[in-house]
Image (cartoon, rainbow, N blue to C red):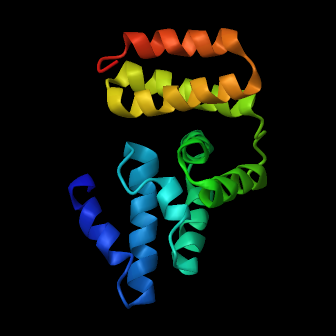
Amino acid sequence: MAPYADRLAEALSDEDEVTRQWAAEALTNLAVLSGTRPGVGELLSHPDREVRRRVAETLGHLPRSASLPALALAAAESPPAARKRALSLLREMGCDTSPESLGSLCEARGIVLLESGDFQLARRYLEAARDYYLEAGDSESAERVSSLLGEAPGG
């Protein structure tokens, strides 16, 4: 389905509301499961309120093990409005949104992705984890993640 992400992104501007909603749902699943663009943060920033609502609804139906790290990554990579929405969704899902907790979520997902060979997406998660740890003042965890980044191809 990833090869069709561009066409799905175009469908977000379709005049038919149902088409926009289905495109938002499909793109949310792709962004969470395989890191395609547009990402969760971009979808949460979409100008169409119904698209944003469908993205949030879809995230709520995905397994927490997938949706929580994706929202933590979106909060790290997004402009302020989307960051605020991502953090709000995380809180609604009962997640601790402290930088330390978000760093831990991103680090765990990054390690899984490293082990599975998805180095590009792993790097995004690990960079977000490092930034969260630095924001929390946890230099030891930031250094640990930096060493993982150094081991990842492309680093």
* Above or below, 86 relative to 52: above
Please identify the residue farthest to the bottom as the structure is shown: 15
Q: Residue at x 45, y 66 (%)?
A: 25
Instruction: Give the percent coordinates (x, y) of residue 41.
Output: 53, 55
**Does residue 108 appear to the left or right of 94 in the view shown?**
left
Q: Position of residue 110 (x, y in %)?
A: 48, 26
Q: Residue at x 58, y 10 (%)?
A: 144
Report the side of 138 relative to 79 (left or right). Answer: right
Task: Measuring from the top left, give residue 80's x and y in whole percent.
Answer: 64, 55
Q: Quadrant of residue 118?
A: top left
| Figure check: 102 above or below 7 | above
Regarding residue 27, the answer to whether it shows in the image is yes
Picture quadrant of residue 35: top left
In the depicted structure, whether residue 63 falls above or below residue 110: below
Quadrant hosting residue 97: top right
Which residue: 61% across, 47% down? 75
Location of residue 76 with respect to 130 vertically, above or below: below
Regarding residue 118, the answer to whether it shows in the image is no
